[in-house]
Amino acid sequence: MTEFSGENYAARCDVGAHLVTLSGTLRLNGIAEYAPIVALLANAAEDATAMTLDLSALEFLNSSGIAVLSKFVIEARNRGDLALTIIGSGAIPWQGKSLQNLRRLMPSLVVEFR
């Protein structure tokens, strides 16, 4: 299990379960500050045939974070052998539209709301 946190967020990766959980408020400045999260996602996806990204407790994600998430979804699509599921919360307004839009990048993406 890999975990780290910032001022208002927490990130956790259970490599064995191929599960990444992001929670809190992610307002990092630019793609470079998202590097630890990019590495966490890549680590969880490595050698996986299925992976889950749980964002159900992620209250806010800025445009740099959405760009990182989009890039990860494109990489998963290009791999061709990774079944990706994203779990969101219907109670968090930004997630409804933003997470569904990721399906345009990867039609096989499963998006579930809790």
Image (spheres, helix red, strand yellow):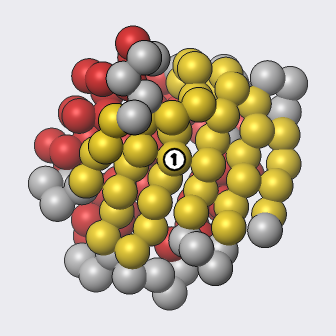
Q: Which residue is mark 1?
A: 54
104 left or right, relative to 45? left
Seen from the viewer's position, the closer of residues 67 and 54 is 54
Seen from the viewer's position, the closer of residues 110 and 7 is 110
Specify the quadrant of the image occupied by residue 1. bottom right
Residue 41 in picture, x, y percent from top left: 57, 60
Q: With respect to residue 106, does 111 lie above or below?
A: above
Q: With respect to residue 106, does 102 lie above or below?
A: above
Residue 50 in picture, x, y percent from top left: 39, 74
Residue 30 at least partly seen = no
Image quarter in which the C terminus is found: top left
Q: Residue furthest bottom?
A: 47
Residue 19 in picture, x, y percent from top left: 56, 63
What residue do we see at 63% from left, 41% from top?
A: 22
What residue do we see at 66% from left, 34% from top?
A: 23
Residue 111 in picture, x, y percent from top left: 28, 45
